[in-house]
Image: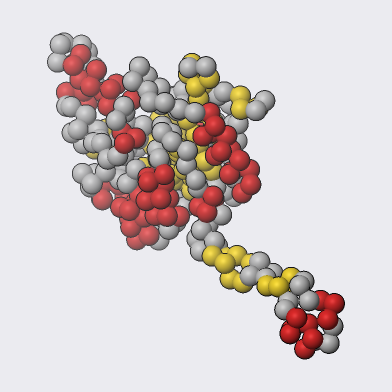
Amino acid sequence: MSTKIEWCKNPDGSPGEVWNPVVGCMPVSAGCANCYARALHNKRYQAYWKGAKLPSQYAFPFHTIQMMNNRLDAPLHWKKPRRVFVNSMSDLFHPDVESDFVLRVLSVIKLAERHTFIVLTKRPKPMRDLLRSIHWLPSNMWIGVSVENQAAADDRIPLLLETPAAVRFVSCEPMLEEIDIRDALRGYPVQTSRPFIISREMALDAGDPSVEGMIWGTNEWEQTCPPLNWVICGCESGTSARPFDMDWARSLRDQCQDARVPLFLKQGRIDGRLVKMPELDGRVWDQYPEEPK
């Protein structure tokens, strides 16, 4: 089913696709408080039991995890290459989703190599552990973590960067506070050497008193893991949306620019109004990572 999600658009600007081989989820952190998927599902769940003609998935409440075997092969029938958001109505790495089923999903992703699959989770540890255990990792899969605040970023991003993938990204949506991901954008670098000031004794030993006080050496850093490839940012929507400050998006934009990492600003609040694809300092930020070759 095509989707209006802005960051899932195809390279030609046409709508991308959503593929939900799993339906249902449960809250895991503050970002889940106003979950759009839960609200949508529960509304249809109530309608189903009032007699509305809806698919049988709505016979179950949202906290029931449903593995939809009948949907597994859908991407294999899509001829035109497209971007595919996996599980807009669930989390592929929820503990109630069987590992064998996840492997079947990954097998379809690998077979449907003409498409680009975008997987987003709030549960990066089981994702990391599973993807590390297979030797046939799909090269057409982007994996990301949702981080709504600094605590979630500090907890989830390191696990993401320990996970093998063609593209690794972070979705700061709903963004509930300013978030600092500067180190993650650069692969959590460690300092391997630092310059120092030449002392008088060193200058005299070298036979050149004029170099006293000069700086010698280099300030070198080394990555400890792969850097992030992409960042998505967006405020919360809906009648219960929590506050959002465009300066939070501005800070994230500056961090991404400094690290030369593409940013996609999906939505923000300007003068109290929700604005899709808002301008920030005179331009729309709709950047994508480079497609892996």
Report x, y in % for residue 200.
75, 81
Farthest residue to the top: give it.
Answer: 51
Residue 259 in view, yes or no: yes
Residue ID at (56%, 54%):
186
Give residue 20's quadrant in the image: top left
Q: Is residue 206 left or right of residue 144?
A: right
Say which residue appears at 62% left-offset and 72% top-offset. 193
- State whether residue 71 appears in this view: no
The answer to whether residue 152 is left or right of residue 33 is right
Identified at 40% across, 38% down, the residue is 148
- Side of 210 where 293 appears, left or right: left
x 40%, y 40%: residue: 149
Query: Vertical placement of 204 versus 107: above or below?
Result: below
Q: Which residue of the protein is positioned furthest toward the front in this rendering? A: 200
Left or right position of 37 against 191? left
The percent coordinates of residue 276 (x first, y second) are 52, 21
Q: Nearer the viewer, residue 150 or 174?
A: 150
Q: How is the image coloured?
A: secondary structure
Q: Position of residue 169 (x, y in %)?
A: 48, 45
Q: Name the quarter where the N terminus is drawn.
A: top left
Quadrant location of residue 13?
top right
Q: Nearer the viewer, residue 161 or 111?
A: 161
Residue 187 point in image, percent of width and height? 53, 57
Task: Count the numbered circles shown.
Answer: 0
Residue 115 vs residue 276, the one in the foreground: 276
